[in-house]
Image (cartoon, rainbow, N blue to C red):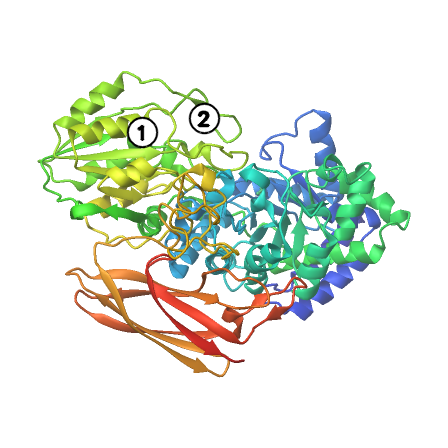
């Protein structure tokens, strides 16, 4: 009888889901909801970690048995970490074939920068400022993920971050709300495509809502103390953009904002996200974050934590197991209304319908697609292209780069230079350890057969275990390879020296108080420079580094982040001029960690440092031992071409201003430039940043050519949110800056009336 009923319901639901209208989906959700018991409804809000290989037997321990029983009863809505076409098929079968209503599970996974073919880490992707490229990368990740049976990624992370100490800065798009909004849209559109039921697309999850990156002192999970101005104008805009891009789901965050744990924040989740912005998807908690409401000291016990989280709009519980054990009673006792429960369950079911799971719960568990899609040669080629555009040429004195492929000898130095693992980055999903193309391999692949390439390790960064969950152990002594590296450097025509971080220095739980170079790297750099001035520094890192000595002394520096599976080949393409670098920094690099949090879009203050006033006097907003400026500013990135900006013209329009500028490629090489527009609203009712990015365009310009570039800035670009979360645009003088970085631009002022 039970089976008959579920077959009946499924067959009602089966009439092709693809392209079903929202109204049709709503109708189906309503009718399914009316057939559900309280326990089944609560089940949909419950998400389990997948504890065993679903292709084998259920382990005999109590927890696994309980989980398996609940899946079979229909008391589970989603699972995390259940993988592969085969594994997801078996887990799905357990739910669909045993439960009364046969409601399919949704499988989620942290696909942060690729499933098995690794793309550059997100901060690297954002350095491309390339909407189409980033979208293409997300499409690739979606194809591999979906083909492995997974429906949903916990990405993108769109927390704007000012603080290089925070390890998760690597997972986002950097310090700017506008650039992060553009990237959010690219990631979400890439993952989700036009039709979520397409078996090669997946649901996105915009996270962490909200304020997580403002963890005090850059220490992960720390309290976030943010003003209304920061919340409304910096933190929230990318999330609003995510809703506009159609993000299927959101994840909340571990931190509190003004004393309210984000998971229990009614204002953020119900009033703003689901109310003002009209978000129709569902909100999943972060791992265990509902339980952590107690640890924050805001909930008395588990039931209270469940009540607060659910009332505030957290629809699905990731592994706190609180909804599982307490939600039915909370609804039964009237503490939580059944309407609220119905709203959460409808949101979850709606996404399952959109994914086409009621049509065919196994539609993503396709082994032949898994074989052809995952880590395919085609995907690696795409990943290489994205890696190339993510790299930022920070310095190139005397045009040391590009190197000639017929160079007689190259010394490739540094433990990072022959690592096949570090370029894969942290949060690497199913990437196989040591599967990246190393820098050394990339160079060997690129050079002429007569070129002598010699590798020397030079320094050792870490010893022992390196993985996602354990602390790293640093090596501070000079190993045997140190002196050998100096010798190798001495006799080479050019040195390529890899410096930076292990990939497990950034990511969740990886905050650092010191963001310089660990171990013997700086010492080695200085010694190498003494014996050979032709040093190209290749940086691998997931955060801005404080490297003033390297920035001053090295003639050439290429920022490569953690470039993914094809990192070495992509770097070599830039070193030898097969690709003209085009990346721009999405974050400011400081001179010193003491400048953090550092961001270019700062306010002027009542006592700014200006050339007029600061000469020798101390009563200005500054450090007595350090500049206020960045070592490398936001938006900075060189090319092998040279660009010049002239003829800036501003024309007022009905609701803003038209900006025209001439950009010329004054070199003998075609190149790509990212033309950036910043504004300063000079007098406003609330003090405004001295510059903030409002638009940019990427243009390819032939050698010796010029292009007229036009931007149309509207009220939306020129206004800001008040402390009551009202958007206003105020009349007055605006300074408009257009240029190649947040520091290097031409400018003009205009009076605007709206
Ligand atoms: C905790 C992290 O904060 C979140 O970003 C991630 O998606 C979940 N764990 C699941 O792994």
Instruction: Report if residue 531 is visible in the image.
Output: yes
* Residue sitting nearer the eye, 663 or 378: 663
Against 455, residue 615 (above or below) is below
User: In which quadrant of the rendered view does residue 52 lie?
Assistant: top right
Local crowd size for mark 1, using a 10 Å CA cut-off: few (<14), some (14–19), many (≥20): some
How far apart are the alpha carbons under marks 2 and 1?
Answer: 22 Å
Residue at 13 percent across and 31 percent down: it is: 492
Q: Find the residue positioned furthest to the top.
A: 480
Image point 56% across, 45% down: which residue? 213
Image quarter in which the C terminus is found: bottom right
Residue furthest bottom as drawn: 654
Ligand number 1: quarter of image: top right
Compare residues 463 and 56 and report the one nearer the observer: 463
Q: Is mark 2 on a helix, strand or loop?
A: loop
- Tell which tag, 2 or 1, sits nearer the viewer: 1
**Dot 2: few (<14), some (14–19), or many (≥20) neighbours within 10 Å?**
some
Q: Residue at x 73, y 40 (%)?
A: 293
Q: Where is residue 430 drawn, in percent x and y?
A: 47, 38
Decide which of tag 2 and tag 1 comes sooner along the chain: 2
Q: Position of residue 406 (x, y in %)?
A: 9, 41
Question: In the depicted view, which residue is nearer to us: 100 or 407?
Answer: 407
- Toward the front, the furthest residue is 617
Give the secondary structure at mark 1: helix
Place of residue 459 in the rendered image (x, y in percent of width and height, measured from the top left): 31, 24
Which residue of the protein is positioned furthest toward the right in this rendering? Answer: 333
Q: Which mark is residue 522?
A: 1
Q: Name the residue under label 2.
A: 466
Q: How many marks?
A: 2
Q: In this view, does 609 lie to the left or right of 82?
A: left
């Amino acid at each position: 009888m039970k089976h008959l009923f579920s077959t009946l319901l499924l067959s009602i639901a089966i009439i092709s889901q693809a392209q079903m209208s929202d109204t049709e989906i709503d109708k189906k959700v309503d009718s399914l909801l009316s057939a559900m018991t309280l326990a089944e409804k609560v089940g949909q809000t419950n998400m389990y970690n997948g504890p065993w290989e679903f292709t084998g037997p259920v382990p005999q321990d109590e927890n696994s048995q309980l989980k398996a029983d609940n899946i079979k009863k229909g008391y589970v809505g989603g699972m995390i970490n259940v993988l592969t076409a085969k594994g997801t098929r078996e887990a799905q079968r357990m739910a669909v074939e045993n439960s009364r209503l046969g409601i399919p599970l949704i499988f989620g996974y942290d696909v942060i920068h690729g499933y098995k073919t690794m793309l550059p880490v997100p901060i690297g992707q954002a350095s491309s400022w390339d909407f189409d490229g980033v979208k293409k990368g997300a499409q690739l990740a979606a194809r591999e993920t979906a083909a492995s049976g997974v429906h949903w990624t916990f990405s993108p992370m769109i927390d704007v971050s000012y603080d290089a100490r925070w390890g998760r800065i690597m997972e986002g798009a950097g310090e700017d709300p506008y650039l992060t909004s553009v990237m959010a849209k690219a990631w979400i559109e890439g993952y989700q495509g036009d039709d979520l039921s397409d078996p090669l697309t997946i649901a996105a999850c915009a996270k962490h809502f909200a304020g997580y990156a403002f963890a005090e002192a850059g220490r992960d999970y720390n309290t976030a103390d943010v003003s209304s101005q920061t919340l409304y104008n910096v933190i929230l805009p990318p999330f609003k953009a995510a809703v506009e891009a159609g993000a299927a789901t959101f994840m909340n965050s571990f931190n509190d904002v003004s004393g309210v744990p984000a998971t229990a924040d009614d204002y953020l989740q119900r009033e703003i996200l689901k109310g003002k912005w009209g978000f129709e998807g569902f909100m999943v908690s972060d791992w265990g974050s509902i339980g952590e409401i107690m640890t924050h000291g805001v909930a008395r016990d588990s039931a209270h934590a469940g009540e607060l989280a659910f009332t505030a709009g957290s629809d699905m519980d990731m592994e706190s197991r609180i909804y599982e054990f307490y939600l039915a009673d909370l609804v039964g006792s009237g503490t939580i209304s059944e309407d609220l429960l119905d709203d959460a369950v409808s949101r979850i079911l709606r996404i399952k319908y959109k994914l086409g799971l009621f049509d065919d719960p196994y539609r993503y568990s396709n082994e032949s697609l898994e074989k052809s899609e995952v880590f395919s040669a085609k995907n690696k080629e795409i990943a290489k292209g994205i890696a190339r555009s993510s790299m930022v040429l920070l310095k190139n004195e005397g045009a040391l780069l590009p190197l000639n492929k017929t160079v007689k000898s190259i010394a490739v130095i540094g433990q990072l230079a022959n690592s096949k693992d570090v370029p894969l980055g942290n949060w690497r999903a199913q990437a196989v350890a040591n599967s990246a193309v190393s820098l050394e391999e990339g160079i060997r692949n690129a050079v002429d057969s007569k070129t002598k390439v010699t590798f020397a390790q030079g320094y050792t960064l870490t010893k022992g275990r390196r993985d996602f969950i354990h602390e790293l152990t640093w090596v501070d002594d000079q190993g045997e390879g140190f002196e050998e590296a100096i010798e190798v450097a001495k006799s080479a025509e050019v040195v390529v020296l890899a410096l930076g971080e292990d990939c497990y220095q950034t990511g969740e739980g990886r905050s650092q108080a010191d963001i310089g170079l660990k171990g013997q790297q700086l010492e080695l750099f200085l010694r190498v420079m003494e014996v050979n001035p032709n040093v190209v520094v290749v940086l691998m890192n997931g955060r801005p580094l404080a490297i003033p000595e390297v920035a001053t002394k090295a003639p050439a520096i290429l920022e490569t982040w953690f470039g993914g599976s094809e990192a070495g080949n992509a770097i070599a393409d830039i070193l030898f001029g097969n690709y003209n670098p085009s990346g721009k920094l999405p974050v400011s690099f400081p001179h010193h960690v003491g400048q953090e949090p550092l961001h270019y879009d700062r306010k002027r203050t009542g006592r700014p440092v200006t050339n007029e006033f600061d000469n020798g006097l101390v009563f200005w907003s500054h450090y007595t031992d350090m500049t206020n400026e960045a070592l490398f500013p936001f938006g900075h990135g060189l090319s092998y071409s040279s660009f010049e900006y002239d003829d800036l013209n501003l024309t007022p329009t009905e609701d803003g201003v038209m900006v025209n500028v001439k950009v010329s490629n004054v070199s003998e090489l075609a190149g790509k430039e990212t033309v950036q527009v910043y504004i300063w609203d000079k007098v406003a009712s609330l003090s405004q940043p001295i510059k903030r990015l409002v638009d940019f365009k990427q243009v390819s310009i032939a050698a010796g050519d010029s292009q007229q570039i036009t931007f149309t800035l509207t009220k939306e670009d020129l206004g800001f949110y008040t402390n009551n979360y009202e958007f206003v645009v105020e009349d007055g003088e605006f300074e408009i800056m257009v240029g190649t970085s947040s520091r290097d631009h031409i400018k003009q002022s205009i009076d605007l009336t709206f």
